[in-house]
Amino acid sequence: MEIYVHIPFCVRKCRYCDFYSVPCGKDPAFGCPGTGSEHTLPGTGDYVNALLKELDAREDEIRGKEITSVFVGGGTPTILPVSDLEMLLMGLKDGIARRGGMLAGDAEITTECNPGTLDKEKLTLMRQLGVNRLSIGLQSADNAELKALGRIHTYEEFLKNYEEARRVGFDNINVDLMSGIPGQTAASCERTLNTVAALAPEHISVYSLILEEGTPLYDDVEAGKVRLQGEDFDRDMYKLTGQILAAHGYERYEISNYARPGRRCRHNMGYWTGEEYLGLGPAAASYLGCEKMCRYKNTADLNAYMSDPAGVRVLEETLDKEALMSEFMILRLRLTEGADRDEFKKRFGVPMDEVFGSVIKKQTGLGLLTDREHSVALTSKGFDVANSVMCEFL
Ligand code: SF4
């Protein structure tokens, strides 16, 4: 089983972001702790206590389980002051053990970080408390692009944090990048990829910008103040990304994820291979065994969560065998290995081709899938239009 912990605070909202996070300087209940510039209000400590309360309440789900991965994401987890980070990381370990779970000896423990909220003290503490992977949100090495996104940091601040993380002993680091940023060109995208790859992080994720309704960027695009490059540019950047990162020794193992050998993100691999996961915090999702498999979501409301951390979870979906078979295909096709026929048969007791034979044949005929003896996978043409291929398996 995997555990995801949501820290829903950011210094301020990035212009494109629709994740559930609170710009903490604007919420009277929560200050802007640890960023050095603003005030410190109590509140994040109370929030960590609420998370640990929710963990305690999930005893039935944790008891007897081996926890193979913990991912502290956000939001901006590293906005927490050192004392709260310490309380959280120690509390998670204690809470898992107290509720009868077992944190695997080689568990992957990741913290998401944003430059501008990191320093040597936090990095050292995380390392000492067992965090063994960092995921740093950079997005671009071009400061004008960072500004267009409304990020709070510059490339130079990222670099300082990255080098500090190496110095305190982190040997497994992911860097998040983005393509399709307003003002980005093929040349600037190439520069970012080469600059970051030259630092040799173990893992790089490259997502294309998605314009989300309700964000300031969406309004600017609607008003004609900002122009996005469009699908052709996206496709070209996707190809360019694959080529540049391959030349630097990174393997694309999932649609948007690239790793050095042996450095795939185990937590995300769990999502794509159907592992159970427990999500803690407002807006966190869980995927747990019930009479079938159940998907839950905590309400995206910080105040409601603070009043009753264990009471805001809502059942979203119960997946029966048919839904699980579709989900198996859709999630596995995200991976370059694709969907394994033997595993499908073992899991569902029926051959993959008996259920999806005609879809596989059609998509193979279109050159979007490759039909290997033991598995089915997207071709490079298929990766370009992955969403439409996956829809065929619904
Ligand atoms: S730091 Fe991440 S979660 Fe926070 S506003 Fe920016 S994109 Fe959203």
Image (cartoon, rainbow, N blue to C red):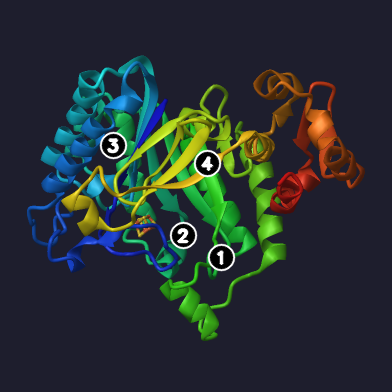
Amino acid type indicated by mark 3: Glu
Q: Which of marks 4 and 3 is in front?
A: 4
Q: Are marks 1 and 2 in contact (CB under 8 Å)?
A: yes
Amino acid type indicated by mark 2: Asp
Foreground of the two, 259 or 255: 255
42 lies left or right of 4 = left
The mark nearer the N terminus, 2 or 3, is 2
Q: Is residue 87 above or below residue 175?
A: above
Element type at mark 2: loop
Q: Report how far apart the C-alphas of labels 2 and 3 lie in the structure.
A: 21 Å
Amino acid type indicated by mark 1: Gln
Quarter residue 107 falls in? top left
> How many other residues sit within 10 Å of disc 3, few (<14), some (14-19) or many (≥20)?
some
Foreground of the two, 254 or 313: 313
Residue position marked by numbered label 4 in the rendering: 318
Q: Are marks 1 and 4 in contact (CB under 8 Å)?
A: no
Q: Give x and y (percent) for residue 227.
A: 57, 77
The mark nearer the N terminus, 2 or 4, is 2
Q: Give x and y (percent) for residue 182.
A: 53, 69
The mark nearer the N terminus, 4 or 3, is 3
Q: Report how far apart the C-alphas of labels 1 and 2 lie in the structure.
A: 9 Å
Element type at mark 3: helix
Residue farthest top in this picture: 105
Residue position marked by numbered label 1 in the rendering: 184
The mark nearer the N terminus, 3 or 1, is 3
> What residue is at 60 percent from the left and 53 percent from the top?
190
Residue position marked by numbered label 2 in the rendering: 142
Element type at mark 1: loop
Q: Report how far apart the C-alphas of labels 1 and 4 lie in the structure.
A: 42 Å
Q: Is residue 168 above or below residue 378?
A: above
Q: Report how far apart the C-alphas of labels 2 and 4 lie in the structure.
A: 44 Å
Q: Give x and y (percent) for residue 394.
A: 71, 47
